[in-house]
Image (cartoon, rainbow, N blue to C red):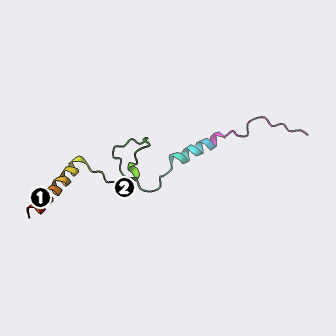
Amino acid sequence: LIIIIIGSNKAISTSKIKKMIAIKKNRREKGSREEFIGSNPHSKGEHFSRSVSVFFDKSVARIITTIVMIIIIKVIVD
């Protein structure tokens, strides 16, 4: 008795593909991510999501700079 197998043994069934797609769509990322701060999500050079640096909005940065300047002037005058 000779059995001849015809076909590819590397073929993936459609149900397995659908299952893999569902797993990928329902995945959750581990760890915390910072808010989107304007970086290009596909850029290889920017690491905003894991960055230690703090980024401020322009108006907040201006207020902080003004407060620091006032404190420096008070120290110099006193």
Mark 2, other Cα within 10 Å: few <14 / some 14–19 / many ≥20: few
Question: Residue placed farthest to the front in the image?
Answer: 76
Q: CA distance from mark 2 to mark 1?
A: 30 Å
Which badge, 2 or 1, comes first in the chain's sequence?
2
Q: Which residue is mark 2?
A: 52
Rendered location of residue 63, percent (x, y): 18, 52
Reply above or below: 12 against 29.
above
Rendered location of residue 65, percent (x, y): 19, 53
The range drawn in magenta is 1-15
Left or right: where 61 falls relative to 2: left
Reply above or below: 37 against 77.
above
Magenta region includes residue 60: no
Q: Which mark is residue 73?
A: 1
Residue at horizontal 40 percent and vertical 53 percent from the top = 50
Residue at horizontal 15 percent and vertical 55 percent from the top = 69
Residue at horizontal 89 percent and vertical 38 percent from the top = 2
Mark 1, other Cα within 10 Å: few <14 / some 14–19 / many ≥20: few
User: Magenta region, mostly helix, strand or loop?
Assistant: loop
Tell me the amino acid under the disc marked 2: Val
Tell me the amino acid under the disc marked 1: Ile
Rendered location of residue 36, percent (x, y): 35, 47
Left or right: where 38 falls relative to 14: left
